[in-house]
Amino acid sequence: MQHRIHTAAAVRLGHHNASRLPPRPRPTDATKPGGFGWHLGQELSVDARVQIHSAGKTVTRDRAVSHGRQAAGLKSRDGC
């Protein structure tokens, strides 16, 4: 199950799975599934929390949100 909560400064993303093992970086291999989520989440988030519970684990991450294309580091269509 995934959920999103948007606030003025951040988006919170959560993911639950049945494994009670803590997440860990794994070598990535484009020819095999898996191993990309932790790396990607680390690059995109400003905070990460892992809760281990009887039903598995929930990883929650916060991603900073900026308003407007310039604040996000994006160029406008005219290249500025």
Image (cartoon, rainbow, N blue to C red):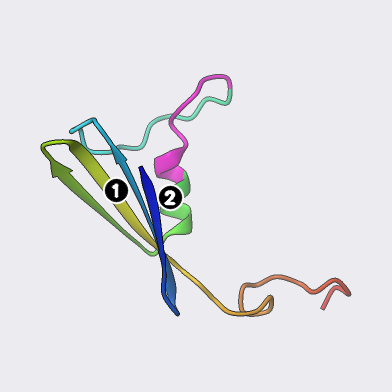
Identify whether 46 is placed above or below 18.
Answer: below
* Disc nearest the viewer among 1 and 2: 1
At 41% from the left edge and 75% from the top edge, which residue is drawn? Answer: 7
Furthest toward the top, the residue is: 31
Mark 1 lies on a secondary structure that is strand
Identify whether 49 is placed above or below 80.
Answer: above
Q: Quadrant of the N terminus?
A: top left
Q: Residues within 10 Å of mark 1 (few under 14, many from 20)?
A: some
Which quadrant would residue 57 be assigned to in this image?
top left
Q: Which residue is mark 2?
A: 41
Nearest the viewer among 62 and 26 is 62
Identify whether 14 is placed above or below 56.
Answer: below
Mark 2 lies on a secondary structure that is helix
Label 1 to label 2: alpha-carbon separation: 10 Å
Which quadrant would residue 31 be assigned to in this image?
top right
* Residue 59 % position (x, y): 29, 48
Identify whether 79 is placed above or below 34.
Answer: below
Furthest toward the left, the residue is: 54
| Residue segment shown in magenta | 31-39
Furthest toward the right, the residue is: 78
At 80% from the left edge and 74% from the top edge, which residue is drawn? Answer: 76
* Residue 15 % position (x, y): 34, 45
- Name the mark on residue 74: none
Q: Quadrant of the C terminus?
A: bottom right
Task: Identify residue type, mark 1.
Answer: Val
* Whether label 1 touches label 2, CB < 8 Å: yes
Q: Which residue is mark 1?
A: 59
Task: Identify residue type, mark 2.
Answer: Gly
At 49% from the left edge and 23% from the top edge, which residue is drawn? Answer: 33
